[in-house]
């Protein structure tokens, strides 16, 4: 089991469970819509999930273009009041199907911002894939199209201070 800051962390999901969910999600994504598919991973948190999901998508026969976007929520204290683009994508999304990948859907503010931005830029369809869905924290009317796992609220204090690599080790010690 991983040890973070002197505490033993019980993994939420095994490597096998995560791999199986990625295969299931990839099969659903491959069923469409996938016209000129562009996958956009939200950095930094999604990079491990995005890599695993992209490998699973390739196993289904899809070879989408991949981009990265970095978004930052800002506001007072720990409450987000808005979202800004730190690093934007380079690709044109006009008339394309877009898959937006993030690690956690919590309040929904960041992914709602990104989804609306992509539609404003002319995306044909925007779908959301998240590894963890924390519905109890939702502030926006937003649901992911593809969800790895429902996330219990008790893990939020641990996730709040973890780097992506530490967070990944809490999902599975074998990841």
Image: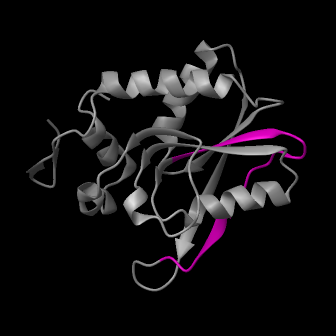
Q: Quadrant of residue 131?
A: top left
Q: Quadrant of the C terminus?
A: top left
Locate residue 62 relative to residue 145 in the image: left or right.
right
Where 81 falls versus 1 (above or below)?
below
Specify whether residue 143 is painted magenta: no
Placement of 132 over or under 30, stated as above or below: below
Q: Position of residue 96 (x, y in %)?
A: 84, 39
The residue shown at (41%, 21%) is 20
Q: Specify whether residue 24 is in view.
A: yes
Write the residue at 53% across / 77% down.
74
| 29 relative to 90 in the view: left or right | left
Q: Nearer the viewer, residue 62 or 2?
A: 62
Residue 107, given in percent of the width and then of the height, sits at 48, 65
* Magenta residue span: 80-102
Image coordinates of residue 65 in percent, x first then y, are 74, 31
Q: Whole-percent x and y of residue 28?
A: 60, 26
């Amino acid at each position: 089991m991983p040890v973070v800051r002197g505490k033993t962390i019980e993994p939420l999901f095994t490597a096998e469970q995560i791999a199986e969910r990625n295969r299931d999600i990839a099969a659903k994504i491959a069923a469409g819509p996938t016209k000129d598919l562009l996958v956009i991973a939200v950095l930094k948190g999604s990079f491990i999930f995005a890599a695993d999901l992209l490998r699973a998508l390739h196993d289904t026969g899809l070879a989408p273009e991949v981009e990265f976007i970095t978004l930052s929520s800002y506001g007072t204290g720990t409450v987000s009041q808005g979202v800004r683009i730190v690093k934007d994508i380079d690709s044109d999304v006009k008339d394309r199907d877009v898959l937006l990948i993030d690690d956690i859907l919590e309040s929904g503010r960041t992914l709602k911002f990104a989804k609306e931005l992509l539609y404003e830029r002319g995306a044909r369809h925007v779908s959301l894939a998240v590894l963890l869905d924390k519905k109890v924290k939702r502030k926006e009317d937003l649901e992911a199209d593809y969800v790895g796992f429902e996330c219990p609220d008790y893990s939020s204090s641990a996730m709040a201070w973890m780097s992506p690599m530490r967070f990944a080790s809490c999902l599975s010690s074998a990841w």
